[in-house]
Image: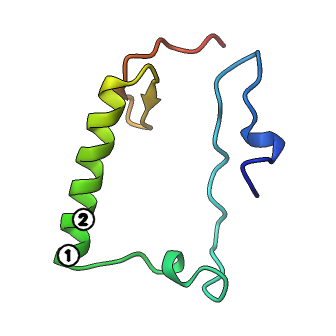
Amino acid sequence: MTLTDPTYQRSTSGPLRVPPAPASIDAEVWPGVARPPAGAKAALAGKAAGALFRGAAWRLPLRVEYPDGSVLGTGTPARR
């Protein structure tokens, strides 16, 4: 699947939706993705990336909704 796939395209009827990840990832094709990083360095990098993302999303006119219901950004809810 690519970003040109119709699944990613914005429609006039609603927000841009990203399709769910596949059930399994081919380790031969995506070795760096098939096994997530672990350890203290990965934990620190993850926290730093999360802080950068939250800081950017907080300032931008977009809305990020997490599965737990929390929301980031200054965008308004999409019309459904």
Query: Disc 2 vs disc 1: Cβ atoms closer than 8 Å?
Result: yes
At x 81% / y 47%, what residue is drawn? Answer: 5
Q: Is residue 50 above or below residue 1?
A: above
Could you tell me residue 39's position as x and y percent? 22, 79
Mark yes or no: residue 70 visible.
Answer: no
- Residue toward you, 69 or 49: 49
According to the image, label 2 marks what residue?
45
Q: Is residue 59 above or below residue 26?
A: above
At x 72% / y 40%, what residue is drawn? Answer: 8
Could you tell whether 67 is left or right of 15 in the image? left
| Quarter of the rendering occupied by the N terminus | bottom right
Q: Identify which amino acid the numbered label 2 is placed on.
A: Ala
Q: Identify which amino acid the numbered label 1 is placed on.
A: Lys
According to the image, label 1 marks what residue?
41
Mark yes or no: residue 71 visible.
Answer: yes
Could you tell whether 32 is left or right of 55 in the image? right
Circle 1 — which element? helix
At x 24% / y 65%, what residue is drawn? Answer: 45
Residue sticking out furthest to the bottom: 28
Could you tell whether 29 is left or right of 49 in the image? right
| Quarter of the rendering occupied by the C terminus | top right
At x 46% / y 80%, what residue is drawn? Answer: 35
Quadrant in which residue 37 is drawn: bottom left
Q: Rounded to the nearest whole Å, what is the CA distance between mark 2 and mark 1?
A: 6 Å
- Residue toward you, 69 or 37: 37
- Residue toward you, 54 or 77: 54
Quadrant in which residue 55 is drawn: top left
Quadrant in which residue 75 is drawn: top left
Could you tell me residue 77's position as x and y percent? 51, 14
Q: How many marks?
A: 2
Circle 2 — which element? helix
Q: Is residue 44 above or below residue 69?
A: below
